């Protein structure tokens, strides 16, 4: 590990020379996938996305899981 004096000298040198540092140009609108393909982040990769539901549920259509209801009931009782 470097001494505090060396660290301080390095910090001062980095601050005084920061105008000479070149910042890379990064295009955040492009992303490279694992397979090497480059895709645009401003467009959808998957063009056709189906809806999650074709219709609204009717009043008796939602049946909650009894185990989840019991767990949530106990969790709410313990928080008060």
Image: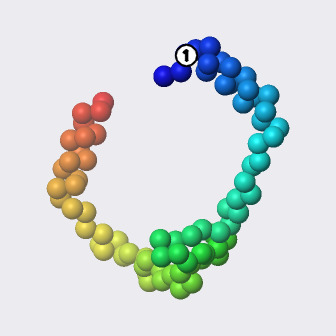
Is residue 22 placed above or below 64 in the rendered structure? Answer: above
Is residue 27 placed above or below 49 in the rendered structure? Answer: above
Residue at x-position 68% and y-position 66%: 29
Q: Nearer the viewer, residue 13 or 41?
A: 13
Q: Position of residue 80 (x, y in %)?
A: 30, 30
Kindly state the secondary structure of the residue where label 1 is placed. Answer: loop
From the viewer's perspective, tell me whether residue 69 is left or right of residue 6.
left
Is residue 28 placed above or below 49 in the rendered structure? Answer: above
Q: Nearer the viewer, residue 58 or 76?
A: 76
Residue at x-position 44% and y-position 83%: 54
Residue 42 occupies quadrant? bottom right
Q: Residue furthest top?
A: 5
From the viewer's perspective, tell me whether residue 66 is left or right of residue 3.
left
Q: Position of residue 9 (x, y in %)?
A: 68, 20
Q: Position of residue 64 (x, y in %)?
A: 25, 63
Image coloring type: rainbow
Where does label 1 land, which residue?
A: 3
Count of marks, rendered view = 1
Q: Nearer the viewer, residue 69 or 34?
A: 34
Residue 39 occupies quadrant? bottom right
Q: Residue furthest right?
A: 19
Residue at x-position 22% and y-position 53%: 69
Is residue 44 placed above or below 4 in the rendered structure? Answer: below
From the viewer's perspective, tell me whether residue 22 is left or right of residue 44.
right
């Amino acid at each position: 590990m470097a001494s505090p004096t060396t660290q301080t000298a390095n910090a001062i040198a980095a601050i005084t020379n920061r105008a000479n540092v070149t910042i890379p140009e990064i295009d955040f609108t492009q992303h490279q996938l694992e397979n090497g393909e480059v895709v645009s982040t401003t467009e959808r990769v998957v063009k056709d996305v189906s809806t999650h539901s074709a219709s609204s549920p009717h009043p008796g259509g939602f049946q909650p899981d009894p185990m989840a209801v019991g767990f949530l009931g106990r969790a709410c009782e313990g928080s008060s």
